[in-house]
Amino acid sequence: MNDSKVFQPTSLGDLMKIYQDYPQALLLAGGTAIAREQKGDGPFELPNIILHINRISELQRISRTERYFEIGSCVPISRILKVGQHVLPKVFTHALHNIAHPAVRNMGTIGGNLSHQPRRLNTFGPLTILDARVELRKSGNSRWVQIPRLFTKAGDPALEPGELISRIRIPFVDWNLQFYQRIGDPFTKPKSSITFTALTDVKKGEITDFRGAFTFLGKSFLRDRELETLITGKKVPLSERIRSEARSLFRSALMELPGEVTLFQKQRALRLLQWYLSALHEPTSELMY
Amino acid sequence: MKIRFTLNGRAVEAQTSTSTRLVDMLHKDLQIKSLHPSCYDGQCGNCAVILNGELVFSCLLPAFAVQETSIYTYEGIVNTLEYNDIISGFHDEKAYPCAYCLPAKVVITQSILESTLDPTEQEILETFSGTYCPCTNFNNLARGVIRAGEYRRRRLHER
């Protein structure tokens, strides 16, 4: 096996120059998700050109303003939890806590978790419905996009050649019910694992806003705006009629998912949504998890 | 590719392929026999090392990722006062990891105590949740880690 060529830049400027010359390079920060995709023992199977980006201080910064929290793409998950545990949205920190275990969270990065190509991992759902944005940089240019724009409808990467995620911006939110559930491990149980993220605002017995999203095996992601519109404006607890309508809408949306999503996962998602909608109530001091 | 880093306090240099896993470079090329490459999936913990002060599983890292870093393994902890704290704590609470598991348990405990000398049982059990070990009672182990923290606090206070 020929050795890969590894670049280890220490500044963002150097990184962008090299990436412009080698846009096909594999960007590797913590590398935990990449490592877990490799099956068996022995050496890693790596592409010809690797950009090891874990030593770039500009990508490891955390900052906050009154309106949002900004995290560099190479900040390890554990550091985000240490710094932002009490200020970041609960639905996001819960998703981070559900990533593997502390030793992996010390290595894995937010950028890697978000941009992992073969499958949508823990942070994708929460950051999508939180209206988080990512900064995409390439030599001489940068732009901010919403999370779903990182991938095409088919689930393939949508970044331009030479473009990389530099920062993630998460607005501070005030939802009174935040819910995140991951069932199964996407690496060891890919045909049965799902994640569900929901944000609900309930004021004086009425749902004033609702957002929900599921991720499945591989690249599939489901957020049904019709469902969100149906639920918004309704009184809690939801009537059987509304819940029945929600089930029908959701079933139709599930039917349109690609074939890689198993029937088991679809059933699981439907049951989880049914449970959530039946459990919705005027919030007490306890947030739903 | 030449990898230069600090291993257990000493500067080392290794020549290895870019595809080599860190655990294999440490175990085969640098003779760190306390590591037991097993699952190669970050599930068992037998390859635990401390990298720049953080606990990591070396089977998930390519060797080149430790360029210009500092790594501690069991070999760098044994024969230190820190090791004595840990073993005393384990024995006080009847936590007796087998010879195969002990190195990883010591490394993980050391990483916990470097972060805090007063860890909670929940923090300890969460950190050990990434390991697989049928030989140790984890409740005793958690209490052993807490006891080790007490020993270390006392020892540092007495300085």
Image: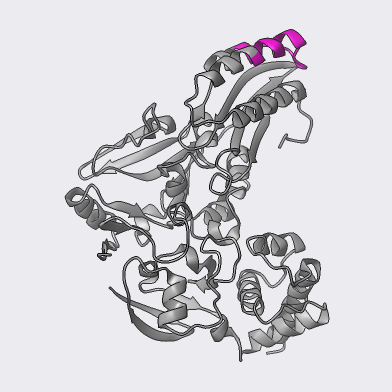
Question: As rendered, which of B57 and A45 lies closer to the eye?
Answer: A45
- Side of A137 relative to B41 (left or right): left
x and y, in percent, of residue A240 in the image: 76, 11
- Side of B134 relative to B16 (left or right): right
Kindly tell me whether residue A87 is visible in this rendering. no
x and y, in percent, of residue B53 in the image: 52, 71
x and y, in percent, of residue B17 in the image: 31, 71
Q: Is residue A29 magenta?
A: no
Q: Does residue A163 sit above or below A201 in this rendering?
A: below
* Residue A165 location, quadrant: top left
Quarter of the image with the C terminus of chain A in it: top right
- Side of A132 relative to B118 (left or right): left
Q: Does residue B80 sit above or below A15 in this rendering?
A: below
Question: As rendered, which of A62 and A17 lies closer to the eye?
Answer: A17
* Residue A139 location, quadrant: top left
- Side of A26 relative to A92 (left or right): left
Q: Which residue is found at the position 73% from the left and 73% from the top?
A: B145
Q: Is residue A244 magenta?
A: yes
Q: Which residues are magenta?
A: A230-247
